[in-house]
Image: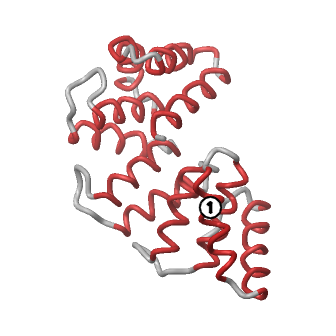
Amino acid sequence: MRKLILIAAALAIGSLAANADPLQDGARYFQRADYNRALASWRPMAVQGNPVAQNNLGIMYLDGKGVPQNTSEAVRYLSLSAAAGSSLGQNNLGGLYRDGKGVPRDFGKAAQWFSASAAQGNSAGMYNLGLMYEMGQGIKAEPFHAYMWYALAADMGNMPNAAAHRDALWRRMTPAAQNQARQLAVACKRASYRGCR
């Protein structure tokens, strides 16, 4: 899943900016499991502060692809990416806090990073925030908000688990609750995902 998000984002950003060819090249190399060439494409950009390249390097260090596995370096690069506003870095750093991988487990910080990612329209951030709301991890359990984030993530079309979670919550709700949850999702989408809890 992380690999697909990483590659899709790099290709999307690469198609938007003329100077982003190393992102596209790195994504193609990564997809072909040519991790040394992906690293060569992304590392200079990451060092220069490109948040997408920083996210990608963080994932490479986390998974030990093209570099020795090093959770500390993964946290460092993902933190830089997240702090620079990358929705990818924010989602991935949230995952580290949720799982307690390389950082102390902190559901509150995980929810904050997932929220920042979701507010930018990142479907993985939306899905993960939905999970946090459903389980009450780091935030108060709120099925309406869990449903809202699952529904928004499912609407993006690239998070199949989101639809299953959305539908399971829906079946447990009363008709009045279903109406309220649906209204939350519509309002959040109209607000371009900003200011939605």
User: Is residue 67 depicted above or below 113 in this figure?
Assistant: above
- Tell me: 73 left or right of 29: left
Q: Inspect the image, locate mark 1, and give the three-letter code of the amino acid beneath it.
A: Ala
Q: In front: 143, or 117? A: 143
Q: In front: 195, or 188? A: 188
- Secondary structure beneath disc 1? helix
User: Is residue 49 depicted above or below 116 in this figure?
Assistant: above
Q: Which residue is drawn at 72% across and 65% down?
A: 188
- Tell me: 183 left or right of 92: right
Q: Where is residue 68 in the image (x, y as percent from the top left)?
A: 20, 26
Q: Position of residue 110 (x, y in %)?
A: 39, 61
Q: Which residue is drawn at 48% across and 41% down?
A: 1
User: Is residue 66 depicted above or below 122 in this figure?
Assistant: above
Q: Which colour scheme is used?
A: secondary structure
Q: In front: 3, or 104? A: 3
Q: Where is residue 106 in the image (x, y as percent from the top left)?
A: 30, 66
Q: Which residue is drawn at 56% across and 13% down?
A: 21
- Tell me: 57 left or right of 8: left
Q: Tell me which corner region of the image, top left, top right, bottom left or bottom right, holds residue 54.
A: top left
Mark 1: give few (<14), some (14-19) or many (20+) Cα within 10 Å: some
Q: Tell me which corner region of the image, top left, top right, bottom left or bottom right, holds residue 67.
A: top left
Q: Position of residue 182 (x, y in %)?
A: 77, 73
Q: The C terminus is located in which quarter?
A: bottom right
How many tags in the picture?
1
Residue pointed to by mark 1: 164
